[in-house]
Amino acid sequence: MKMKTIATVLLLIGLTACTQENRQDERGNSEKNVSLVQLIANPSVHDASTITTVGFVHFASENNALFIGETDYRHFITKNSIWVEYPDGMKARLEEFNNKYVIATGRFYADKTGHVGLYSGTLEIKQIRTNDPEKDGESDTFRAFP
């Protein structure tokens, strides 16, 4: 089971690392597809950019974070994660996404390092959905475009 988890994480990282691309969101704003590894390694390159990335999300009062993988979350390796902030309208749906691999889109800030400065930046989530190929992608998506 452990090897399967590691293989899955490596596959996700590899896929997202190979596909940094720019596209436009629903409102015509430029959006970058960036792996969490790239984001953490070069945060200033993506500062104040709208990005889409993949990771393992965990929501708790002092640990709202998007981790590179589940193992990083379980071992509380916060430098392998970014802090996440979400709109008030998402609070009721946090459990839908908690402790799952997700695809998250939002504005990234390199200089905001989350709770007591433990994280490698902050993502203000505007859209999130589970990264589950067996689902249709709509029933498990939250969008909040102000």
Image (tube, grey):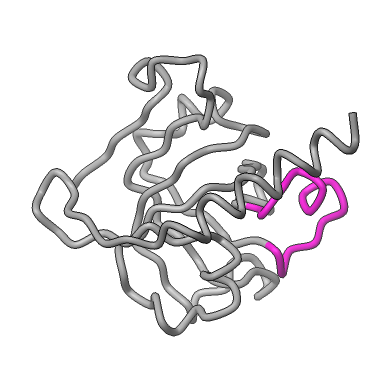
Q: Which residues are magenta?
A: 67-80
Is the residue 68 above or below the residue 127 in the image?
below
Image location (x, y in percent) of residue 142: 36, 31
Seen in the image, is 46 located left or right of residue 96? left
Residue 118 sits in quarter:
bottom right
Task: Give the residue drawn at x 39%, y 15%.
Answer: 136
For the question of whether residue 96 can be seen, the reply is: yes
Q: Is residue 73 magenta?
A: yes
Residue 87 location, quadrant: top left
Give x and y (percent) for residue 67: 66, 53
Position of residue 34 relative to residue 10, above or below, is below
Q: Residue at x 50, y 65 (%)?
A: 122
Does 32 appear in magenta?
no
Up the image or down, 20 lies above or below 26; here it is: below
In the picture provided, is 78 more to the left or to the right than 140?
A: right
- 30 shown above or below 103: below
Identify the image quadrant of the N terminus: top right
Instruction: Name which residue lies at 41% across and 82% down.
Output: 45
Q: Does residue 65 appear anywhere in the picture?
A: no
Residue 132 percent coordinates (x, y): 53, 24
